[in-house]
Image: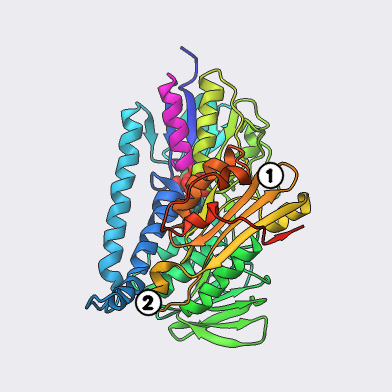
Amino acid sequence: MSDYDYDLFVIGGGSGGVRAARQSAAAGARVGLAESSRMGGTCVIRGCVPKKIMVFASTYRESLAEAQQYGWSVDAGDFDWSVFAPKMRAELDRLEAVYRKLLLNSDITIHDARAVLKDANTVELSTGKTVTAKTILIATGGHPVRPPLPNAELGMVSDDIFLMEELPKSILIIGGGYIACEFAFILKGMGVEVTQYYRGEQILRGFDGEARGLIAESMHEAGIELHVGTDIAAMEKDGAGIRVSATTGSERTFDKVLFATGRKPNTDGLGLEAAGVKAGVKGEVIVDEYSATSAPSIYAIGDVTDRVQLTPVAIREGMAFAQTVFRDNPTPVDHELIPSAVFTQPELGTVGLSEEDARAQEPIEVYATSFRPMRTQFIGKTDKVLMKLIVSKATRKVLGCHIVAPEAGEMIQLAGIAVKMGATKEDFDRTVAVHPTMSEEIVTMREPTRTG
Ligand code: FAD
């Protein structure tokens, strides 16, 4: 028995913290966990889960319009937020309870409190209690930030979307990242007039250029008013709405403004200095490949480290931490070739290098095809999908795979296995196609579209 209250104290009951706590307890550690808000963290309460449920809700108008074209006599009518929102919130309550149960079943002590580091082995809780632990894990995640603009508090951030009492008639979304683009499609699908300002040249910076272009086209087709090279310059209350001046000189009033302008790690007032934990310029906890911080007894995982801000990555980091610290099996976190999806409509699924990044690295061949999918071509729609492979000329390995299509998130999970295994273009080619599907094109592209 050690002199500490716990072998491990986890600060934060989100994706990373919960997984790390459970895995460590399974290895025999005595674990305590503090959560200052709701168990489940960003992903379950104000991120992936409610967002995806909203994606589902937002697609029915289009699906039913398509169904009519296929011969069904149906009419979507109007979307009723007051019916949908309580159901969504009840589902989050259910999931939160599941998370709590999982922790309790693992004999983890839950503290519903904010935790602050006092030194490298001591944590003070907002309940007034002080606890000690041989190892402390910081898994406090991050929060959305508003730009430094007068009256910025008039605008919402992503957390607020899930708490809205009613849907606005019109909304201005500021930002061009995945959260901004996903909400643009979601809200448009629910019947809101959506305008989006993004100060850069093209939305979804960092993703493959051709894929970004196709998503932007889909936005225009969906009736989302996307303005690139445009930012918000000023905002003020205008009756029940918000008057917004843009950097381009235009002035318009919207019911709501949503800032999707970035996130910041939750480290303010966390006591990092007192515990000897070094942070970077954004406030992110600096860690090595084992998630160890500058204080030998303290580790950090997930969004608070600002490595890759995705739930499965936080979970992987939590599992690697437990292996390293409690299973005597030092396990570095593998951040290479992480597949991911953007839940726009259509979705973007991606793994590996974009064409632009690959081209800067080595000579490549690009195999790409953009076409009208059978399902919607049948009813005369003009929407297109994209299947794209980036191939190394030297090794023939597939360096990147990018798919823009309905359910691309589902497709890329599987393509990701092949890319992670180091599959070559020839491995893709000798795989027999599944017909008739959209993704069969991924194994039937014979001639490069371009090289370089
Ligand atoms: P979190 O899940 O944020 O958990 C941290 C927890 O720590 C929180 O519950 C917080 O209340 C608590 N906490 C903070 N400070 C303290 C303290 N001092 N004491 C006690 N508790 C504290 N990822 C995907 O993979 N796919 C998606 O589709 C996706 N969609 C997203 C959509 C949105 C709108 C957002 C905002 C995020 C989305 N993400 C998505 C990202 C994903 O949610 C995060 O990467 C993930 O939740 C990070 O997990 P974490 O454990 O690091 O932190």
Q: Quadrant of the C terminus?
A: bottom right
Taking the image as shown, residue 309 lies to the left or right of residue 167, namely right
Q: Residue at x 40, y 77 (%)?
A: 168
Identified by mark 2, the residue type is Ile
Q: Residue at x 43, y 36 (%)?
A: 18
Whole-angstrom CA distance, mark 2 to mark 1, is: 39 Å
Would residue 185 be counted in the magenta stretch?
no
Which x, y percent locates residue 16?
Answer: 49, 39
- Farthest left residue in view: 73
Q: Would residue 252 appear left or right of 19 to someone viewing this image?
A: right
Tally of marks: 2
The residue at the point 47 percent across, 28 percent down is 131
In the image, the segment drawn in magenta is 12-28
Checking the image for residue 310, the label placed there is none
Tell me which amino acid carries mark 1: Arg
| Circle 2 crowding by C-alpha within 10 Å: few under 14, some 14–19, many from 20 | few
Q: Main secondary structure of the magenta part?
A: helix
Residue 396 marker: 1
Q: Nearer the viewer, residue 4 or 198?
A: 198
Q: Considering only order in the chain, which callout, 1 or 2, is on the residue closer to the N terminus?
A: 2
Secondary structure of residue under mark 1: loop
